[in-house]
Every structure is written in structure tokens, then in C-alpha cells.
Image: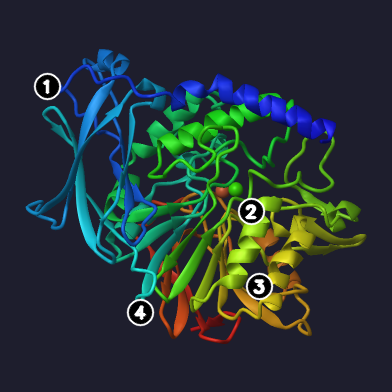
Amino acid sequence: MQRRQFNLCLQRSALALALSPWFSATAQPSSVGHKWHTSPFALGVASGRPRADSVVLWTRLLFAEPDRAAAAQAWSVRVEVFADAALKRRVYRAEVATDANRAHSVHVHVTQLQPSTDYWYRFSQGDAHSTVGHTRTAPSRHADVPQLRIALASCQHYEQGQYIAHEDIAKQALDFVLFMGDYIYENSNPQYAIRKHNGDEPKTLQAYRERYEQYKRDPALQAAHAAHPWVLMWDDHEVVNDYANDQDRHYTDPTQMLLRRAAAYQAYFEHQPLLLGPDAHNPANMRLYDQLSWGKLADVWTLDCRQYRSPQACRDPVRGGGRMVVQCDELNDASRTMLGAEQERWLTESLSASKRQWKLVAQATQISSTSVPTPVGRSYWNDAWDGYPEARKRLLQTVVDAKLSNVVTLGGDVHCNVAAPLRLEPNNPASPIIASEFVTTSITSRGLGDKAAALIRESNPDLLHYRSDERGYSLITVTPKEVRCEFRTTKFPAGSEAGLKTQASYVVKNGKAGPQLI
Ligand code: FE
Ligand code: CA
């Protein structure tokens, strides 16, 4: 074992000890049948991780004055699941204990449900009831499924716009929302703030919890959660901008950085409809990456592109993290990784073995190239896959080696709508198109300026569509015939005009790689 690895092991077991209260048993609830002055369900409800026979339901109790003293206690929360919107046919009921060690969050794994079925659910405590949420299970693994409909969303900086995209998402008929990361932002940019974060940049568990609290109070975000199950991935801002594994931009000591990351990961799990993964005993190292199947129609992989990645190549020695790099030999180091060895092996194996018609690979950022020419050579954004070209080659080589057709990658992070063919050699028309990429713009977060976007567009012929000026989300409709992507957008800042419109639509036809404008 190398010294650095040994140090990491030590740090991680120390972290596990420091954070162990979260995983201790919940105290016995000391009170039921409370009369509330203010409803403790102010953060709404959520469902997620849809499977053919199960979903995860979520809420979190919040205690406002004069009920604030209740925060010291353990509480028992009732959850009920119904087969009808009128809440007449109850199919499940349970009492779940929660306490301050988990910020009074409630996670319920409801099993033994029917496939492809709608359910409604609510939580109750004493005389208070939550809003009613709607969820839907996945089809059974061998079902013929006519359609899968997903809203693809990412990057919802609270300060930089109103969540009108979520109002639109809440109204759509969907199977699930696929959130690609940057659910919260730790940072602020007063220049673009139309509303304000409470408090300073979070670094502690308490501060991250308060940041989620502020985001989760937004009624449009609550509506999108109550309307559909969510499938979740994270990117960098759930912890800190441009972090890579145990490195941040300020070269903070990795032990300190991992403590901060563990606090952020814990707050993340506390606020999302997720099950704790197999690494739940170690919050410094939580598995989020996952795979789900949608009948015979599609396999969906949701990847973790932050926790295991190599540091960005050719970092600035003072201010690390993302930047444009030129003449950077480190880019070509084959040992550098975006997914980490274990996740990469898992993805290679399961992708190669997939027998479902469509293979949707959801990853946090952009795979197609956005490099631009300079007098001394091409310049690459080192935080996206352009900064990990050898890892990108391995991912795409898997598609070639396993002779996979109908691979569509989905992404976020770059605050830009992108439709692009994927080739082993980006922008080389002689290199065959082997897969298709859609990247969704941000819900609110500001995009690249027009000049930079135009330069990127004209420098990369593979970018059929590249627009950073508008905010929104993308509707993905998968059928046996095609995968359709509809970019739903509004002006920046979101909320400055009413409603969303369709910026453009693209399809990938069955058996023919590469998006086409329709
Ligand atoms: Fe973002
Ligand atoms: Ca990001």
C-alpha cells in the first residue's frame, strides 16, 4: 500500500468515527399526537429511486417557533401510500422514527408495490399532514414498454433565477425527473443575484442543512418533487465548486476537505429520496452511482463524476480546479480517471452486457469537445471530459468493443443545451459516429457569454446544437422508434419572462447513432 493510500485509509476511518452518530439507532420517539402551531412539513415531500416493486419516500420535519423546542426530541412520523388520488384505497402504512442525528429526515423504502403503477402518499405527525405526493413505479424488467418520459434537469443556483422550469416540469406527464447535479450551490455571485442565499458559504453539516432548507422551501421545487419520482446524481456544487475527490481549488489539506465533503454528502442524503448505499457506514465514501431498467425499452446508468476522479490536469498552482489548459501533457496520462477504477469497471461490464434497446448513460457533465484554437495549440476545459480524454476514449471504446447500438449519453453542468454525435476522435468526420449526446441547460444558473459560446460552436463541428443563453430543462421521450430531446427554455434570469418554450428538438433514430434536428 502506498503511503498516500495508507494516509487516506487512516483519514477515512477517523472520519467514520467522527460522523458515527448519524448511523446510530434512532432514539425512541418521546411523543405522538402533538398539536402543531406551524406544520412541521414545510419542506414538502419527495419520492425517488423508482423500481418495479419499490420507491423511496422522503420528508423532513422542521420546527418553527413556538414549536422549536420539539427539535430536541425524537419523533414518530406516519407514512401512508394509496392506490388512488382521492386517498381512499390505502395500500401501505407505517410509523417511522426520526431524530436530530439525521436532521429529523424521514426515508421510507416502500416495497411490494405493483410495476408501472401510480401511487399517492402523505406523511402525518399529530394533527399535521404533509402535502400529498404522487409517484410511479418502474415497469417490470421484461415488460414491453411503449414509452419512457424523463425531465432532464441540472444546476439550480437559487440566487440566479426563479424556478419556473420546475413549475413546467410539475405539469408534464413524466415517469421521473433525472437530476444531473448542482442541486444546491455553495457559492454566491452578487452580480447575478435576484434573490439571496441565507448565511455564508456552507462548510459544516449544520450549514449545508440550512442551505438545503432554503432551497427546499421553494414552492416550485416542492411541486416538481411532489409530482414525480426523482432519480438523482450530484456534481461539484453540492460540496464545493470544481472539487475532485479529496482536492479542492485552494489545495486544502485532504483531511479537512474530506471532512467537509462528508458533511455535504450527509446533508445531501438527508434531503433526498435516496437509500443509503452499501458504504453507508462510511459517510466519507458514499456510493451514489446506480443503474435502473425500464422494461425491455431502456437501461439507465447514473454516474458519479466527482467522488473518485483524478484532479484536473495542469491545475493553476495557486487557484486549482477548472480552467482552460493548453500544451498540457498531463491530459494524455492514461492513469487519469473520471469515474474511478471501480465505477469504471462496473459501468464497462454492465453496459457491455446490456440487452435493452436503449442504453442511456447519464453523467454529470459534457462528453463532446468544446476545445478552441489558440496560437500555441488547442485549449481544453479541464473540468469536463475534455480534461479526461483517455477516460473518455475508454468509455467510447467500450461502446465499440461491445458493438453497442442505441447508446445515448445525457449530461448537465455546463449550463448549455448541447446535441452532438460522439466519435472516438471528436470533430474528426472520418471517425465514425458511435453514440449520441444530449446535455441540458441549467434550471437557473448563468451560462457562458455569447462570444465564448460562438467561438466554441465554430471550433467544434460536432456541436450540432450549442446554446448557453437560455435556462430551462429537457424533455426526453424514449420509444422503440427513437429518443427525442426537446430543449424547454426561458430567458435569463429565469422568471424574467412568463413560461417556457421549445428552443429546439432533436431525435436519435433506432439503430442510427447521432442526433438529427427535427
Ligand atoms: Fe452548475
Ligand atoms: Ca457543476
Q: Which mark is residue 35?
A: 1
Is mark 3 in CB contact (under 8 Å) with mark 1? no
Residue under numbered circle 4: 144
Q: Measure the C-alpha gap from mark 3 to mark 1.
A: 58 Å
Which sits earlier in the primary sequence, circle 1 or circle 4?
1
Looking at the image, residue 384 lies above or below residue 240: below
Q: Is residue 189 visible?
A: yes
**Which residue type does callout 4 highlight?**
Asp
Mark 3, secondary structure of its residue: loop
User: Residue 4 vs residue 48: left or right?
Assistant: right
Q: Image point 50% across, 38% down: which residue?
A: 193
Q: Is mark 1 within 8 Å of ligand 1?
A: no
Q: Amino acid at mark 3?
A: Leu
Q: How many angstroms separate mark 4 from mark 2 (CA)?
A: 29 Å
Left or right: where 45 falls relative to 417: left
The structure residue drawn at horizontal position 86% and vertical position 58%, both measured from the top left corner, is: 332
Among the two numbered marks 3 and 1 on one chain, the one whose residue lies closer to the N terminus:
1
List the residue tagged with mark 2: 343
Question: Which circle, 2 or 3, is nearer the viewer?
Answer: 2
- Residue 237 appears at what percent x and percent y? 57, 41
Most foreground residue, 484 or 159 = 484
Answer with mark 4 or mark 2, whichever residue precedes in sequence.
Answer: 4
Which residue lies under the disc numbered 3? 463
First of labels 2, 3 by sequence position? 2
